Amino acid sequence: MSDPLHTLTTMPTERRPGCPFDPPPELTEARRNSPLNRLTFANGRPGWVVTGYDLVRAVLADPRFSSRKELMRHHPTIDYGDIEVPPAPPGEFLLMDEPQHGRYRKPLAGKFTVRRMRQLAERVERITADRLDAMEEAGPPTDLVTAFARPVPAIVICELLGVPYEDRGSFQDRIAVFLGGEASDEVLIEAYTGVQTYLAELVAAKRADPTDDILSDLTGGDLTDEGLRGMALILLTAGFDTTANMLALGTFALLESPAQLAALRAAPGLVDGAVEELLRYLSVGAKFYRTALEDVELGGVTIEAGAPVILSISTANRDFERFPDPHALDLRRSDGGHLAFGHGIHQCLGQQLARVELRVAFPALFDRFPTLRLAVPADEVDLRPETADIHGVKSLPVTWDV
């Protein structure tokens, strides 16, 4: 490690113009200097940004780095002052450590296995075909986000959890609001409260009249209504927003890489590897947060107890010491092992579901619309702000020959 004390004065919040798929340039430069970088947070506290693959993976697997919400009184751009952050509500296990984390995650583990998710492929194919039918019927141009990228994963996860069909539109819109990174506090609170109220009613309905879905199955255990509501919120948001942004941003990346898209069209068997490479290259879940529970030696440096730590997934997945030519999109890349789904106990529970959806959706989209192309110049595509939890596009105007 060349300079373990390389310092970022602020967390970068802008990507380079014309480079919507690359990490912010200051983060890329930080990784070139060191896989571990000092950062001053908005409240003035010193902390760390981990930019290297090996160190990010190590932190994700180390229980001495906590995910607990009440310890996250730090943010790269928001000063919380003296506000006390409460513990995560029951069921929201992504913001918990063991043993609380396992109490909520374990009942779900058997419901998202590789085998079960592959069995869903036929249903995903039907949902995908239905959305493509609707796109074709409406005709070009269209916004791929609203016409395809959001509806496919939203319908899939809502069916899995048992959200009634007629409720999906409003539910999807509310989730998009509080994950988009731009709404005012008032609008955010309104959307979040609306989702929580809806989920409370849904849990009560499943207890009274179970149906064939995951949420109904969970009501048969010893989880409280509040715990079930929190678990449903995690599953619905994680199972919808990340995949929706992968579909839209991945399509954008392929349209901007015609040679790679041609390779995918010419070799359908390439799709599994292509999806893994897009996950690595785009890293839509660009960063994770942790807090050191004790002094920890990391990369030859002591991370002090209580220190806030940001894990830069986008630069870890572009680490020149881990991936040859890391900034190139290469659908034939064989050196896997990306961290797009995280690592350790918090590794994404729904990763196999996401893979099924992406493996089905990308080929189906380009098979149906072989002349698909951007309807605006690439530099006019509106990106989500870096303050959003998930990187992506707000909209993706596309067109095709009729």
Image (spheres, rainbow, N blue to C red):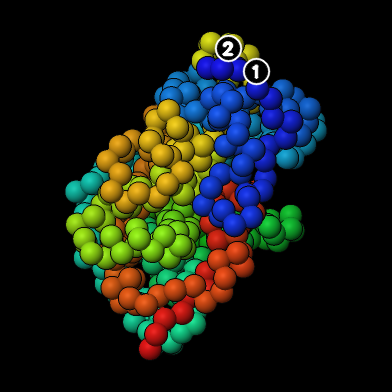
Q: Earlier in the sequence, mark 2 or mark 1?
A: 1
* Lateral position of residue 315 relative to residue 212, left or right: right
Query: Which residue shows up at 58% across the image and 12% down it?
Result: 301
Does the image show residue 233? no
Q: For the residue carrying disc 1, how many other residues have a C-alpha within 10 Å: few (<14), some (14-19), or many (20+)?
A: some
Query: Which residue shows up at 57% across the image and 53% down it?
Result: 19
Query: Which residue shows up at 39% across the image and 67% down it?
Result: 152
Looking at the picture, which amino acid does disc 2 mark?
Val
Instruction: Report the residue marked by disc 1.
Output: 5
**Tag 1, which secondary structure?**
loop
Q: Which mark is residue 346?
A: none
**Quadrant location of the C terminus?**
bottom left
Q: Nearer the viewer, residue 278 or 328?
A: 328
Tag 2 and tag 1, C-beta contact below 8 Å: yes
Residue 15 point in image, percent of width and height: 62, 49
Instruction: Report the residue marked by disc 2.
Output: 301
